[in-house]
Amino acid sequence: MGFNFCWSFEHHHILGLFMMVVFVAMVECSSLNYTSYNKKVSSLRFNRITKHLDKINKRPVLTIEKAPKEMPRGINNNNDGDENGSSNEMEGEGEKGKVGREEWQMWHLNGTQCPKGTVPIRRSRVNDVLRAKYLYHYGKKQPRFPFSGLHRRRTDAPDVISGNGHEHAIAYTGSSEEIYGAKASINVWDPSIQAMNEFSLSQIWVLSGSFDGPDLNSIEAGWQVSPELYGDNRPRLFTYWTSDSYQETGCYNLLCSGFIQTNSKIAIGAAISPVSSFAASQYDITILIWKDPRVGNWWMSFGDNILVGYWPAELFTHLAGHATMVEWGGEVVNMRTNGQHTTTQMGSGHFAGEGFGKSSYFRNLQIVDMDNSLMNVQGISTLAENTNCYDIKSSYSNEWGTYFYYGGPGNNPQCP
């Protein structure tokens, strides 16, 4: 069973930084399926796992950078609705429907909140690690396949590699100008997952480096359903980073050193609620990732400009400077159980052509330019490896700016 914690800290002003001395208070959160994972484990492996968990869950001392003094200019563009998550009339591709502006997280539903001066975390348990194939794999994405002899379907669409079962439906922009961030509102669903070691996610990628080599830098955030990582089938807010194409560096959420959380209201890895329903209420989250022009760290905000935390610039090589491409969209893992394409759904589990209220969407796509200004994305390219399984359809409107529908059911008569 998963748990959330509130880490409390005392502030000490040292050279413009805050030192956090962390103490832990526990708040239990319920979970759904996949939680009773019975697997025999040797005492040696059990000891290794508990040592690893002690490292992850220990009471650390963190150095926290001050919040950036300057948010990207134009940040209030295309903000509709209020901060309390009330529904608003939205126009999507010529038809009106209700969109809940911002949903919240399930651990808030019983009134639980971390007190001021704390940050919430999701504690890892032994069963969480046992669901991973190896201890080293826990909390990490796997490299698609070895880089020698690498074959890519599209050389101009980084991080989209049809290997190791990963399939995508994405929009992307490459620019001759330097990119310093990206933003979008992302429709949240609870897609079904066929196998424990499969997942479905919808996210923003901020990328730089050699896309067909071992030094890709990537910053990622969005929502995902991953039974292997979380032990249930709920959509959860997540972050990820890597500076070497997912080989050695980086991890999900707070499962290794890297992303530094500064917010007491947002729990990385916590379940999102409510979620969208077919032909009924729609809910989305807004995520912005951008580079602080003064210090150089990459910050993430959630919802109505709520600062969640940051990735220190020193984590990266290429992204220590700027990004060269942004991607928005969905990804699933297809393990082809019994030799057939997975039934794991992407987004709502419905194809892009079904439109508002039925298929999932990204709206108001924006990038941050070298002047730290948010710019509406004028043109995007799209890519789906197998449109019979998952597809994507982009468009533009005054209300949603550049947007797209995407997703699909996976296995079907046209996707065997």
Image: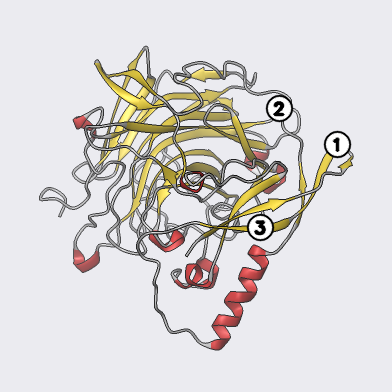
Residue 293 badge? 2
Sequence-first tag of 2 and 1: 1
Element assignment for label 3: strand
Q: Residue furthest left?
A: 413
The residue where tag 3 is placed is: 25
The residue where tag 1 is placed is: 16
Relative side of 178 to 168, left or right: right
Label 1 Cα crowd, 10 Å radius (few <14 / some 14-19 / many 20+): few
Q: CA distance from mark 2 to mark 1?
A: 17 Å
Q: Nearer the viewer, residue 180 or 134?
A: 134
Q: Amino acid at mark 1?
A: Gly
Residue 295 badge? none
Residue 187 lies, in percent from the top left, at: 37, 34
Q: Amino acid at mark 3?
A: Ala
Label 3 Cα crowd, 10 Å radius (few <14 / some 14-19 / many 20+): few
Q: Are marks 3 and 1 in contact (CB under 8 Å)?
A: no
Q: CA distance from mark 3 to mark 1?
A: 28 Å
Residue 313 lies, in percent from the top left, at: 70, 41
Sequence-first tag of 3 and 1: 1
